[in-house]
Image (cartoon, coloured by chain):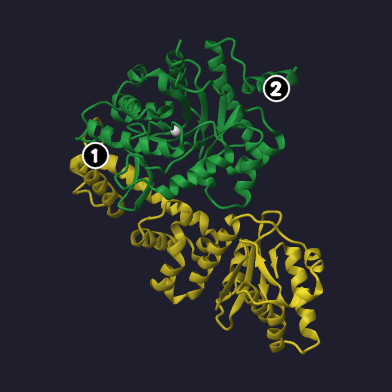
């Protein structure tokens, strides 16, 4: 491999990241009416614009929540701290929630990291792998003796998102062009995200028992264990009925990819 | 007689397949000869983009165009990327696969840009070896495209066209000649675009790109967000004269108009070609005949 080529590329990339021209400029020829500085700046501007646009596109609502000045401050800080190491810009903002949770002044408002994390989940649901979806009738056809041992496998787009703020409610308000209510950190909220049959990304809030139930099935518990678990929330007669009606809804939403007995 | 033709037959006139037009293309099945898809856009696991890609692949010839092979890079070739590329190619069966004669990343850091190489024999040796690896892995020749550039290196010992030609020869790959990029770089570096055209070996040119750019007077930036400008149309006609009928597509990545507007621009390309090749027959030209028929 050509060592001088590697050095040249290092100098170029360092310049893109830092804006320091000293080591790269000597490689570049001065020609015509365009100064070397301008020639370099064309590349650095393009680099920064590309990354900024990625953040704007993937985190549109966060941008509106922050307003222009804070959003600029965030993008500059993030780009500086996280030179892209991902092959695809799709993944460039993966560390944004952590950045917001750690970096002042953003870390003073935990809802910001939560909004960013929720937007990452939306993206995951959007382009997760495809898979078949079962209907409720598939479950009904299962022989009754197999029910207690039955486990569920979920569609790959299914995501559970839990946060300690009203981030998703704020996200919804902004999306509907309404002013979000003040940040509220009084309770844990659970959300279910998935991509339905229409290939639209959808989400709903989960009651505590629904969250427990979903998590239980995702972790591989079977029907019998799940009914047991639901005793925390319901009495003996109610529990199986609650499990069954939750299940029926999940099948209708297209969440279930497979039954395992 | 031995058939020494390297390139595939003329495929007609194509457009870039963009998200905004998925639904239009599927519903109206516009008379366009083929589509070029950005490989990276479909290297996701599933969802809407994949659904449209497969549906459209059933109706149109596709070619795959990538931006992140970093064939001129000095990091090892990204085998995960190449595997994903090959998998996608198995899914959509593209007529061909292209990327750019440039580098995009070094030391694991990605510029997400098409950065210029120094034009030296050393670089040619380096890149040709990597092209060989890629072509062996994919089991086919790839096309490499000339990029727009805004700076030149002291290291360079030859002109861009000699570099491109020699590389294609040594690597035994094909050329995607971007007519707009030639124009943009000619303006930025002060060379004669006709000299560029005249030095490229026609045997290896399998595709043309056309696109719009942003003109800042002293320099020009390859933005793909405007219509093709007159000087690029002229250069395209000169390219047709030199290279004959070469599959042509128009790239539009920003400020994307409604599909029919792009189709009209593509018809302009087809008309220019039809002037030089009177017996030309393609779906793109059929669309024009239909439109005129309706107007009567
Ligand atoms: Fe191009």
Tell me the residue at 43%/74% (across/down). Answer: A107
Q: Nearer the viewer, residue B1 or A248?
A: B1
Q: Which residue is mark 1?
A: A36
Q: Which residue is mark 2?
A: B291
For residue B150, say whether it is visible: no
Q: Quadrant of ligand 1?
A: top left
Q: Neighbour class for label 1 at 10 Å: few (<14), some, many (≥20)?
A: many
Q: Which chain is green?
A: B
Tell me the residue at 66%/27% (across/down). Answer: B31
Q: How far across and down, in percent of the image, does residue A42 sit?
A: 33, 42
Left or right of A148? Residue B242 is left
Left or right of A6? Residue A52 is right
Q: How far across and down, in percent of the image, does residue B38 sit?
A: 51, 40
Q: Nearer the viewer, residue A147 or A238?
A: A147
Q: Nearer the viewer, residue A244 or B138?
A: B138
- CA distance separating discs 1 and 2: 50 Å
For residue A8, say whether it is visible: yes
């Amino acid at each position: 491999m050509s060592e001088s080529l590697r050095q040249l590329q290092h100098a170029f990339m360092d310049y893109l990241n830092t804006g320091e021209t000293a080591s790269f400029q000597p490689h570049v020829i001065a020609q015509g009416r365009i100064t070397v500085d301008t020639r370099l700046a064309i590349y650095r501007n393009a680099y920064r614009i590309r990354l900024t646009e990625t953040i704007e596109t993937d985190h549109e609502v966060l941008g509106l929540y922050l307003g222009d000045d804070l959003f600029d401050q965030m993008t500059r800080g993030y780009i500086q701290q996280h030179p892209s190491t991902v092959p695809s810009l799709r993944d460039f903002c993966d560390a944004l929630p952590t950045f917001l949770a750690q970096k002042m002044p953003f870390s003073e408002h935990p809802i910001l990291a939560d909004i960013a994390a929720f937007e990452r989940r939306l993206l995951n649901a959007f382009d997760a792998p495809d898979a078949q979806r079962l209907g409720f009738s598939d479950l009904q056809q299962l022989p009754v003796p197999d029910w207690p041992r039955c486990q569920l496998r979920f569609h790959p787009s299914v995501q559970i998102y839990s946060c300690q703020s009203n981030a998703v409610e704020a996200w919804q308000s902004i999306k509907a062009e309404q002013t979000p209510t003040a940040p509220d950190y009084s309770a844990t909220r659970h959300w279910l995200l998935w991509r339905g049959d229409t290939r639209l990304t959808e989400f709903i809030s989960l009651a505590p028992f629904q969250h427990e139930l979903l998590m239980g099935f995702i972790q591989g518990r079977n029907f019998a264990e799940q009914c047991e678990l639901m005793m925390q929330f319901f009495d003996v007669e109610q529990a199986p009925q609650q499990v069954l009606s939750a299940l029926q809804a999940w099948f209708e939403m297209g969440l279930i990819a497979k039954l395992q007995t | 007689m031995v058939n020494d033709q390297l390139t595939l037959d003329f495929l007609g006139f194509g457009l870039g397949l963009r998200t905004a037009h998925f639904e239009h293309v599927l519903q109206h099945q516009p008379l366009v000869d083929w589509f070029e898809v950005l490989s990276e856009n479909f290297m996701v696991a599933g969802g809407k983009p994949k659904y449209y890609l497969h549906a459209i692949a059933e109706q149109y010839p596709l070619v795959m165009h990538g931006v992140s092979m970093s064939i001129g890079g000095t990091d090892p070739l990204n085998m995960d990327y190449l595997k994903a590329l090959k998998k996608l190619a198995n899914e959509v069966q593209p007529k061909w696969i292209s990327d750019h004669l440039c580098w995009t990343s070094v030391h694991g850091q990605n510029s997400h840009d098409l950065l210029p190489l120094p034009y030296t024999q050393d670089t040619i040796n380096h890149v040709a070896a990597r092209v060989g690896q890629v072509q062996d892995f994919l089991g086919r020749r790839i096309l490499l495209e000339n990029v727009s550039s805004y700076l030149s290196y002291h290291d360079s010992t030859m002109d861009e066209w000699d570099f491109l030609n020699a590389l294609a020869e040594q690597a035994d790959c094909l050329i995607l000649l971007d007519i707009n990029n030639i124009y943009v770089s000619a303006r930025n570096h002060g060379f004669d675009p006709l000299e560029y055209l005249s030095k490229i070996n026609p045997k290896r040119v399998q595709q043309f790109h056309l696109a719009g750019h942003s003109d800042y007077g002293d320099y020009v930036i390859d933005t793909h967000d405007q219509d093709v400008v007159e000087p690029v149309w002229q250069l395209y006609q000169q390219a047709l004269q030199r290279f004959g009928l070469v599959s042509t597509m128009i790239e539009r990545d920003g400020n994307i108009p409604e599909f029919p507007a792009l189709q009209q621009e593509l018809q302009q390309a087809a008309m220019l070609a039809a002037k030089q090749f009177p017996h030309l027959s393609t779906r793109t030209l059929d669309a024009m005949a239909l439109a005129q028929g309706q107007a009567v």
